[in-house]
Amino acid sequence: KTKIILDTDPGIDDVFAILFAEAHPDIELKAITTVYGNVTIKDATHNALYLKQKYQLNADIVTGASKPLIRPPVGPTVVVHGEGGFGDVKVPAEVEGQADPRPAYQYIIDAVKAEPGEITLVAIGPLTNLALALQADPTIVDLVKEVVIMGGAFGENDHRGNVTPFAEANIHDDPHAADMVLTASWPVVVIGLDVTEQSFFTREYLDQLRDDAGEVGQFIWDVSRYYLKFYIEKVGLEGCHVHDPSAIAYVINPALFTLREGPIRVVTDGVAEGMTIQKFDDRVYLHDEWMNKASQKVGVAVKDAELLALYRNSI
Ligand code: BDR
Ligand code: CA
């Protein structure tokens, strides 16, 4: 079993990912650390506590950062995830249970130190909590098993982002945190839009989940209505991209993905703020000392049919 701490801003596709991680026997979902992003930190933590109650999750729920390190907050993406983050599904105002008293970054440090080499950090929201953990205790880079991130866009044309032509949402929300996390000398795998936009939950796929996967399938279907509508009406697609569950799929079966190696940097301001750049060739530039960082892995292709089957068979 891979022990994971899932850092998340739930969020509709975050729900898809949380329930996937909980369902798969090869994953032990140790904790859910929350972060602002799709919703406010208050809603993110409330939504996570609700899922814990509803599905009797063993995972600790831990409250994370409420805003980016340096840049002004972008704010919740109501048009994609709805007012509270679960689309048209209203989360009850009262939920049982409480978040761990520690801030997420401290929980991450404590957990990683308690089980050196055992914990995989899976981040499917802005990278602020991971950056705060690195700042507070840089020794964790040698203690974490792997860091798997849904974020970024590495395509070669100039229309490669989803919130700007250049930037993907999680990285754009906190580019300074992302640059810290992606350049630190721990083993990072980035599953970005280049692969997550290659898999689709179509209307038919979601209908089948609802029909075959019991209450969990029904809940995924209910929550997905708003997201699907956004994709059909605003993006012009016949299904929604499979962003956050792809990071979980990587943890379960890395062979689904083709990876490319090289150091990564993030543009932290200006028109291309949040753009991710990987240097993956041997060319020597006059001034590439800014790129001279740890080599990381970036997903460039995915076996999408196998990923969709894995998801369906797990839920
Ligand atoms: C990412 O941004 C959020 O809207 C999703 O939950 C996902 O983590 C996709 O760009
Ligand atoms: Ca997310």
Image: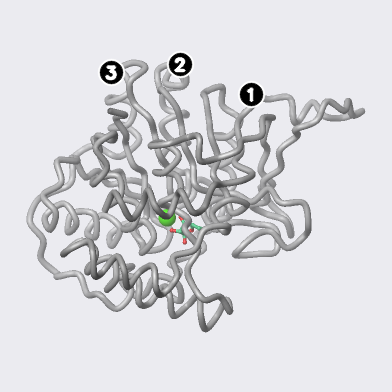
Are circles 1 and 3 on residues that touch, CB within 8 Å? Answer: no
Residue with the mark numbered 3: 115
Name above or below for residue 218 compared with residue 263. Answer: below
Residue 202 in the image: x percent, y percent? Answer: 45, 70
Query: Identity of the amino acid at label 1?
Result: Ala
Which quadrant would the N terminus be assigned to in this image?
top left
Horizontal side, residue 209 vs residue 293: left or right: left
In the rendered structure, find residue 36 and report the number of the disc placed on it: none
Residue 54 in the image: x percent, y percent? Answer: 12, 58
Q: Of 60 and 212, which appears nearest the observer?
A: 212
Report helix, strand or loop for mark 3: loop
Report helix, strand or loop for mark 1: loop
Query: Identity of the amino acid at label 2?
Result: Asp
Name above or below for residue 113 compared with residue 226. Answer: above
Residue 182 picture quarter: top right
Residue at image coords 68%, 48%: 154
In the rendered structure, which disc, 3 or 2, sits on the residue that comes first in sequence?
3
The 10 Å Cα crowd at callout 2, few under 14, some 14 to 19, many 20 or more, is some
Residue 308 picture quarter: bottom left
Residue 22 picture quarter: top left
Q: Of 34 and 249, which appears nearest the observer?
A: 249
Q: Residue furthest right?
A: 286
Q: Of 181 and 297, which appears nearest the observer?
A: 297
Report helix, strand or loop for mark 2: helix
Residue at image coords 37%, 75%: 82
Query: Identity of the amino acid at label 3?
Result: Glu
Colour setup of the view: one colour
- Ligand 2 image position (quadrant): bottom left
Are circles 2 and 1 on residues that touch, CB within 8 Å? Answer: no
In the rendered structure, find residue 142 and report the number of the disc placed on it: 2
Residue with the mark numbered 1: 294
Q: CA distance from mark 3 to mark 2?
A: 12 Å
